[in-house]
Amino acid sequence: MIVGIPKETAAGERRVALVPEFVKKLKGVSVLVEKGAGSAAGIGDSAYEAAGAAIAADAKALYAQSDVVLKVQPPTPEEAALLKSGAAVVSFLIPSVHADALKALSARKADVFSMNLLPRISRAQFMDALSSQATVSGYRAVVIASEALPKFFPMLITAAGTVSPAKVFVIGAGVAGLQAIATAHRMGALVEAYDLRPAVKEQIESLGAKFVVLDLDAADSQTKGGYAKAQSEEFYRKQRELLGKAMSGADVVITTALVPGKPAPKLVTADAVRGMREGSVIVDLAAEQGGNCELTEPGKTVVRHGVEIHGPLNLPSALPAQASQLYARNLVAFLGLMLKDGKLNTGADDELVRGTAVLRAGEAPEPPAPAVVGGGKQ
């Protein structure tokens, strides 16, 4: 059996689905890597060859030979047309967003698995690609903020006097938010954080931040999978008002709030931005799902009311070496559920395999995969 690793073709995508150190962990299979697949992540073809992989001259040659294709972004319809009939594809993919790709994959009678849909249970932690990439995003968000903010993050005691530390406010304490908190704290900033779920208070405080309590009744605020639940519009109205007051003294605001299956909640109003000091910075990690800030423009950096607002897309791609390494570890662990004696059992009776299956032999499984809204690139 041949596992193929194509070069990513999506604009701005620098990650690769497998790094050399994991080639030998795919027991009993051959690994075929498209020429230059890892170059954007700083990985040369020679590194793959040294690990035991073969190099395909181009995408056409790779797809024609591969029984399983591992990708970051979902195949384009053009890439899907090159796929070997009946092959399997594992990537980030959202059924409601990538309908054209799914149609083309269905025509090739492909087995398709989406890492977006991995059930959030304890034994899936090693495979949780959304979390691994969110870790990269949370770190990178703080780096962006530190470069944009016209002042130091840490407190400095100098001969000319003491420089006060920057104040960072993080909204949302999922994986990305917690990583942002930890990174900002390590850089010396004073960090405060808010989350709808009171259960994360201990996690926030363990990372050196202050948990901000808003006067809100957030009953039933968390799903079984640990995500925040959607609330009423009246709840969000009051939440926006209180968040505006809480963030008024911050130098940096990092927003990470998402609700699965819904566009990102608008938590930061234009009035809240107007209430911040000039020179302050907002980094909106929910930009790909529409943004948590009313003034965010996805994919752009804008200045509104003297505040610099960043709406970055595909942040993990900005650190492709580590992002690829983490993603490769997730994929190898996931593939291990179906690999046995060098053969792939895509019908494996495992809840993680069932939960991620989008197509089986080109047909939607029963029950069909959830039509997750938003997300796009991861």
Image (tube, grey):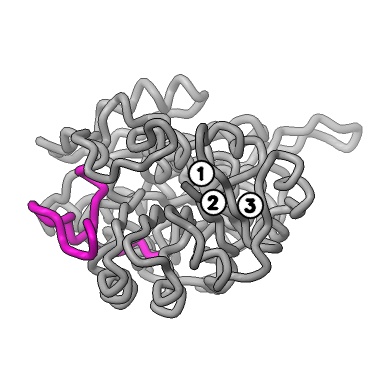
Q: Quadrant of residue 156?
A: top right
Quadrant (top left, top right, bottom left, bottom right) of the C terminus = bottom left
Give the spatial CA distance, label 3 vs label 1.
10 Å
Q: Amino acid at mark 2?
A: Ala
Helix, strand or loop status at disc 1: helix
Q: Which residue is mark 2?
A: 17
Boundaries of the magenta span: 354-376
Q: Who comes first in sequence, dot 3 or dot 2?
A: 2
Q: Are marks 3 and 1 in contact (CB under 8 Å)?
A: no
162 relative to 304, above or below = above
Give the spatial CA distance, label 2 vs label 1.
7 Å
Helix, strand or loop status at disc 2: loop
Q: Which mark is residue 320?
A: 3
Q: Position of residue 141 (x, y in %)?
A: 56, 50
**Residue at point 65%, 36% (across, down):** 21
**Residue at point 43%, 74% (across, down):** 76
Q: Which residue is mark 1?
A: 327
